[in-house]
Amino acid sequence: MEARAIQSGVRQSARKMRLVIDLIRGRAVPEADAILRFSKKRAARQIHKVLRSAVANAQQAAQRQNTPFDADTLRVSYAVVNEGQTLKRFTAAAMGRGTPILKRTSHVEIRVAGVDGAVAPPPTRARPAASAAAKPEAKAEKQPRARKAPKAKSKAKKKTTGKKKKASK
């Protein structure tokens, strides 16, 4: 079973909201709920509302299909934040000018799916030991370059006068 919830026009920039949405993508719903409840970011409150709405939508879908429902078995299968409409305003600046203010908005979409549904695993970072093992092999394949012999310095230097000669036409 899969359910989704969308909130459009959230009055916060998508860049700031993505920092929070990346924390819950691919996680179990109870774990994502705990992360959002204790996050200090302002975006966490809006994303938490969308997550609760997606879980409620899944519960309603289960009731319509007359199937058992357990919210603890759901996972966040898809979570994105897209840019919304930008509100353009102006503020006073020096010498009678106006400078633009961009009030950015965003759209939040979260899909939750049961354990049997297709779920993308949460992104994991590459292990430093695995990447370190690959580097010595790459260095062994490279051959050192032959160095050029240094140029001999000439002892006779040209004397230059302080005055430049004008070119005549």
Image: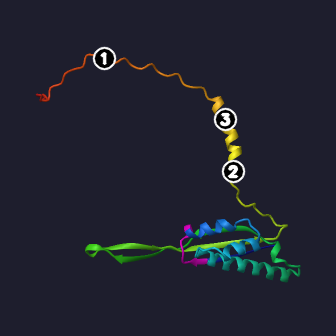
Q: Residues within 10 Å of mark 1 (few under 14, many from 20)?
A: few
Residue hosting label 3: 136
Mark sitting earlier along the chain (2/1): 2
In the displayed structure, does residue 99 sit left or right of residue 20?
A: left
For the point 63% across and 78% down, the residue is 45
- Between 58 and 156, the residue placed more toward the observer is 156
Q: Name the element at disc 1.
A: loop
Q: Position of residue 142 (x, y in %)?
A: 61, 29
Quarter residue 84 falls in: bottom right
Residue hosting label 1: 154
Residue farthest right in this picture? 67
For the point 69% across and 50% down, the residue is 126
Task: Classify 152 as above or below 134.
Answer: above
Quarter residue 119 falls in: bottom right
Residue hosting label 2: 126
Distance between the Cα atoms at labels 3 and 2? Answer: 17 Å
Distance between the Cα atoms at labels 1 and 3? Answer: 43 Å
Q: Name the element at disc 3.
A: helix
Residue 11 in the magenta stretch? The answer is yes
Query: Magenta residues, as a range?
Result: 8-15
Q: Residues within 10 Å of mark 2 (few under 14, many from 20)?
A: few
Mark sitting earlier along the chain (3/2): 2
The quarter of the image holding the C terminus is top left
Kindly identify the amino acid type of the residue bearing the numbered disc 3: Pro
In the displayed structure, does residue 95 sit left or right of residue 85?
A: left
Quarter residue 139 falls in: top right
Task: Classify 66 as above or below 19.
Answer: below
